[in-house]
Amino acid sequence: MQFRSHISARIPALVLSLSGMAGLPLIGLATTALAPSQAIAQNTDSDDASTSRAKRDALLALSKPITLDVTDQPISDLFDFIVDVTGVDLLPIYSTDNASGVGIDPDTLITIKVKEIAGITVLERLLMKAQRIENIGEDYTWQFDDIGSIECGPKSELNRTTRLELYDVADLLFIVPDFDNAPEFDLQQALQTQGGSPFSGSSDDAEEPDTEERATKISDLLMANVEPDQWITLGGEASITYYGKSFVITAPDYMHRQIAGYNFWPAHLQQSQRIDGKQHMKIKPQTEPKKKSTSRPSSTRSRRP
């Protein structure tokens, strides 16, 4: 397990889109809501410069457009093709890689036709197709490892690598008090009483909200919408703890991506989406002027022995 400190303003942006469902007041979130691009810029983690650069370069490589038109092609060949075209360090987790047999079947036959589509999108489509065809009861996705390579496969296998991150949520816990018990002002009465106070009525301080109760609501909101099956309280392995106005979250990279995005990737290329009632962070490719893309001719192949 790795440890990283993650002072994240992306959490407020994420919770802002979910808070209506939980009835949470949003007064303390106004600044973040107005400046989502600044939120990403405030994210920090303990990756050294070379690791952050490697991860950014991997996403840049997977931004390259790919053309594919194949029928019944083993998925392992298609992963190899992505590597050949983009140069990305891709590490599929195959069922033949471990004794448990959990992973992507390298011989799963895929039919796909795409033209000038970013490599990251093609990778996600291949994973979705494999997930549906193999139907082992698990979702397939991708994530970064600790040196910037991209691994992909069933979430149960990706869960073997986790890291601990500290998310500062003090801005989410702050609520501007609503002073609805101000005293009444009567100047005429004060003049008649010769020096009396013009104020009357209640002067008690407004009741302050319970920050721990609010933190619990926010953490429940995150767990209910971001990979709900993966949290330890719901049968998974990821954990979240509130400590010192921060969330201490231990989870694999793909879960941290759903929570806070990637600080090394432009904010406008990270889009929070709701799919099947769950929150997802869509990583968009970096578009460049169109160039001649590498294409692969149509082919039909039978299952290898």
Image (cartoon, grey):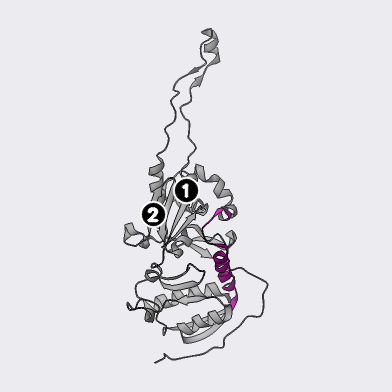
Relative to 101, does residue 298 appear above or below in the rendering?
below
- The residue under the point 68% across, 72% down is 289
The residue at which mark 1 appears reads as: 169
Magenta segment, which residues?
41-65
Relative to 272, does residue 89 appear above or below in the rendering?
below
Q: Position of residue 8 (x, y in %)?
A: 51, 53
Secondary structure that dominates the magenta span: helix
Q: Position of residue 93 (x, y in %)?
A: 42, 76
- The residue under the point 40% across, 76% down is 132
Image quarter of residue 205: top left
Residue 50 lies in magenta, yes or no? yes
The residue at which mark 2 appears reads as: 240
- Identity, as a three-letter code, of the amino acid under mark 1: Val
- The residue under the point 51% across, 58% down is 46
Q: Nearer the viewer, residue 69 or 77?
A: 77
Mark-to-mark CA distance, 2 and 1:
13 Å
Q: What element carries label 2?
A: strand
